[in-house]
Image (cartoon, rainbow, N blue to C red):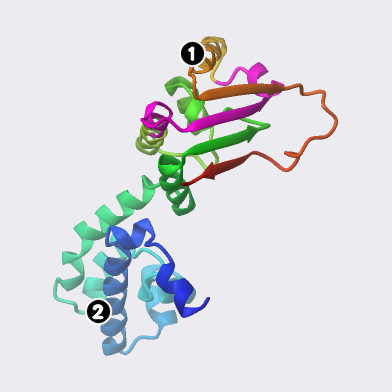
Amino acid sequence: MTVEERERRPETPAEADGTTGLLTAVGKMLRLLRKRKGLTQKEFGRLVGYSPDAVSAMERGVRTVRPEVLEAADDLLDAGGLLRQAIPEVREAVARARTRHPEWDRGYAVLEAEAVELHHCCSYAMHGLLQTEAHAHALFAKRRPFLSQEMIEKRVADRLGRQQVLGRWPAPIVSYVLEEVVLDRPIGGREVHAEQLRRLLSVSAMQNLEIQVMPTGVEEHPNMDGSFNLPEEL
C-alpha cells in the first residue's frame, strides 16, 4: 500500500471510537511490566493460561487483553493496581466490538445513504432494505456462530435504520432483481413470511422503486456467484 493510499484510507470504527488506541496503550503497559519482571512471553503466557503468540498479539494491541488477564497480571507483574484501573475501559471496548457491524459493512452503508441510484440482484435472500423487522430478526437469530440477543437487536435496529434511504428526498432510483426462490422461502415461519410479502407489495408501489422477479428455473444468469449491489453516486 502506498503512502497516498494509506492517507486516503478511511478510519475503521475501531480507530474512530478509540478502541485501537486503548488496546495499543494497554498492550504497551503489559509488555513493559512483563519485561521489567524478567518474564518471557512464553513464561508469562503459562502463568495466565495463554500461548506466547496470544501474549504477543495482546502486547501489540491487535488482540483484546481479557479483563481476567489484566486482573491476574496486576498481581503477577507487581503493577500496583495500574492494570486493574484499565479493566472498565477494556470491558466497554469489548462490548462495543461485539455490537459493531463488520467494518466493510459500515463503509457500504455510508455509500448507500448518499447514492442517487441503487441496483440490487438477490438470488438467495431478501435484501436488507426490503426486510421486515421480524424477517431480519429471524435471519440474525440463525447466524453461525451464534449472536448474543443484544447483538441481534442491535443488528436489526441498524438494518431498519438503513431503510430510511428509500423514503429520503431527493429520492434515489432503486431497482431489484429477486430470484423467485427468495419469495418462496418462508423465513421465520408462515406469518412472518406473509408479512414480508405484504411489505414487498407496499414498497413496490413507490414511484422510485422497481422490483423484478427472475424465475428460479432460469439455467444461467449473471448472478451465479451470489448477490451484488451497485450504489451510484453523483
233 left or right of 177?
Answer: left
The answer to which of marks 1 and 2 sits earlier in the sequence is: 2
Residue 155 in which image quadrant: top left
Residue depth check, mark 1 versus mark 2: number of the one nearer the observer? 1
Say which residue appears at 25% left-offset and 53% top-offset: 92
The answer to whether residue 102 is above or below residue 118 is below
Picture coordinates of residue 112 (x, y %)? 46, 42
- The residue that appears at 35% across and 59% down in the rendered structure is 14
Amino acid type at circle 1 is Ser
Please name the residue shown 38% across and 32% down the image. 170
Q: Is residue 86 visible?
A: yes
> Who is closer to the viewer here, 175 or 62?
175
Marking on residue 49:
none
Task: From the top left corner, tell me how far across and down residue 126 is, in percent.
Answer: 58, 27
- Identify the residue at horizontal 26%, vertical 82% (top origin): 33
In depth, the one of 232 and 34 nearer the eye is: 232
Give above or below for 118 relative to 26. above
Whether the magenta-drawn stretch holds residue 165 is answered as yes
Where does the image place residue 176, in percent across and percent down from the top left?
Answer: 60, 28
Crowd rating for badge 2 (residues with CA inside 10 Å; few <14, some 14–19, many 20+): many
Q: Secondary structure at mark 2?
A: loop
Where 57 sits versus 41, above or below? above
Q: Which residue is mark 2?
A: 77
Q: Which residues are magenta?
A: 162-187
| Residue 92 among those drawn in magenta | no
Residue 51 lies left or right of residue 177; in this view the side is left
Front residue of 227/233: it is: 233
Residue 114 vs 107, above or below: the answer is above
**Helix, strand or loop for disc 1:** helix
**Amino acid type for the residue under numbered disc 2:** Leu
* Residue 66 seen from this side: no
The residue beneath circle 1 is: 202
